Image: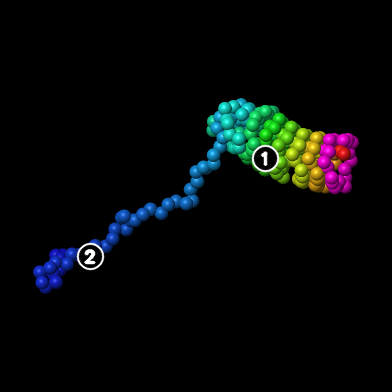
Amino acid sequence: DAPLGDGGGNVTPPVQEPNQGENTPATPDTDGPTEDTTQYSEGLAFEKVDGGYAVAGIGTCTDESVNIPATYMGEPVVGIKESAFGGSKIKHVTVPEGVTNLFRAFNGCYELTSASLPEGVTNMFYTFAGCGALTDVNLPSTVTNISGAFAGCSSLTHFDVPEGITSLYYAFSNCTSLKSVTIPDGVTDLFAAFQGCTSLESVTLPEGVTTIASAFSDCK
């Protein structure tokens, strides 16, 4: 149809219906996966093991706060080799989910002050032995073995042992600043647990303890 006039010679243009979708901003998809922006430490040394990779050493990494990645070369990081960080100058470490065994992993990290451990870790045999600056570490509920885990951690002042632990074999030996420890029911073995803890003031023993040999030797 021809455009209508207004009687004065002016032409009124026809009204156009908007084209649905034209010039309409797209709604962002908020349901898709989000990008991981976590900053992981670079330069760590890795070694191929069954099931993935294990951290083998500090490598060329110069971070004081080490954040271990959960994957390496497209495969999961499943462990940390014995004494992998021994003698390094790291002050904090974050261990990723998927790691279960910390056998002597940070033994001799003399400047380490704190550590973040994931649920799933079970074995902490001498994990932090000799870490004289360590003051802050919360154990995951999955840990079952802390034998010698904090031996020589001379800056620890208090510790709450989590449920599920049955043995404190040498767990806190020579923790010379340790003043108090909370021990849950279920712990039966205290062999040399507090040997050389010269500042120890109080420990409440649960029922069921069967072995206390040398547990408090050299505790003034």
8 above or below 93? below
Residue stretch rendered in magenta on the structure: 192-218
Q: Where does residue 78 sit, x and y in percent of width and height?
A: 63, 34
Image quarter of residue 66: top right
Q: Residue furthest left?
A: 9
> Badge 1: few (under 14), some or many (20 or more) residues near its Cα, within 10 Å?
some
- Residue depth check, mark 1 versus mark 2: number of the one nearer the observer: 1
- The colour scheme used here is rainbow
Q: Write the residue at 63% across / 28% down.
A: 57
Amino acid type at mark 1: Ser
Amino acid type at mark 2: Val
Q: Secondary structure at mark 1?
A: strand
Q: Residue furthest bottom?
A: 7
Q: Which mark is residue 114?
A: 1
Image quarter of residue 82: top right
Image quarter of residue 83: top right
Q: Where does residue 156 sit, x and y in percent of width and height?
A: 75, 41
Q: Write the residue at 70% across / 42% down.
A: 136
Tag 1 near tag 2, CB within 8 Å: no
Q: Secondary structure at mark 2?
A: loop
Q: Write the residue at 72% across / 34% down.
A: 131
Q: Write the residue at 89% across / 40% down.
A: 210
Q: Is residue 200 magenta?
A: yes
Q: Is residue 142 magenta?
A: no
Residue that numbered label 2 is attached to: 15
Q: Quadrant of the N terminus?
A: bottom left
